[in-house]
Image (cartoon, rainbow, N blue to C red):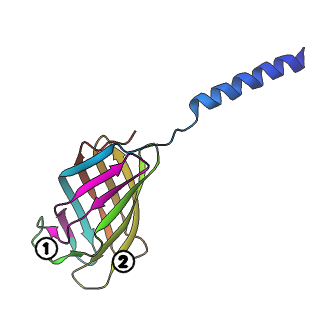
């Protein structure tokens, strides 16, 4: 009797675990535009800048590609002098709302290269990057980018 009860309980636990297993997250499929952005970057000078004219494409999988303009629009007057040297960023869904953004590369005011990957969240249609080092460089990045229509579910 105990073996049968244990077997029934084990079966119930296995079915319950299957029902709560994490499902892979996917971005909606299509082409999208950025409606607003505010990105802070710092090497030796803190700047609040806006990402210049880019679009986002997604095939509906776990990644979305961001085509980035080459300069940052003025938020602070020095932003146009920060050059983005990579033309595409890749947003990869990690599960839940967690994402990794890779391919970020910039030439800051003082020269050198700031590049790497950062982690953040994607909720609704907004990518949020908490203030953090950009890869292993001496630069920091953080901010939000809102993309019209792109969702993660």
Disc 2 to disc 1, C-alpha distance = 20 Å
- Circle 2 SS class: loop
Q: Is residue 62 left or right of residue 28?
A: right
Q: Is residue 88 above or below residue 15?
A: below
Q: Is residue 52 magenta?
A: yes
User: In which quadrant is the C terminus drawn?
Assistant: top left
Residue shown at 23% from the left, 49% from the top:
32
Quadrant of the image occupied by residue 27 = top left
Residue 138, horizontal then vertical, whole percent: 36, 77
Numbered disc in front, either 2 or 1: 1
Q: Is residue 19 above or below residue 122?
A: above
Mark 1 closeness class: few <14, some 14–19, many ≥20 residues within 10 Å: some
Residue 128, horizontal then vertical, whole percent: 31, 52
Label for residue 138? 2
- Circle 1 SS class: helix
Q: Which residue is mark 1?
A: 80
Q: Is residue 67 magenta?
A: yes
User: In which quadrant is the N terminus drawn?
Assistant: top right
Q: Which residues are magenta?
A: 47-73
Q: Is residue 46 left or right of residue 22?
A: left
Quadrant of the image occupied by residue 20 = top right
């Amino acid at each position: 009797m105990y073996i049968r009860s244990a077997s029934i309980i084990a079966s119930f636990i296995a079915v319950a675990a299957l029902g709560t297993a994490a499902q892979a997250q996917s971005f909606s499929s299509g082409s999208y535009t950025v409606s607003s952005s505010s990105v802070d970057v710092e090497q030796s000078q803190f700047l609040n800048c806006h990402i210049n004219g880019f679009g986002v494409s997604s095939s509906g999988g776990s990644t979305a590609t961001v085509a980035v303009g080459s300069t940052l629009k003025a938020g602070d007057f020095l932003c146009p002098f920060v050059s983005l040297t990579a033309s595409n960023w890749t947003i990869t869904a990690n599960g839940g709302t967690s994402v990794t953004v890779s391919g970020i590369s910039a030439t800051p005011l003082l020269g050198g290269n700031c590049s790497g990957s950062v982690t953040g969240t994607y909720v609704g249609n907004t990518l949020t990057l908490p203030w953090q080092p950009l890869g292993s460089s001496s630069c920091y990045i953080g901010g939000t980018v809102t993309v019209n229509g792109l969702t993660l579910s």
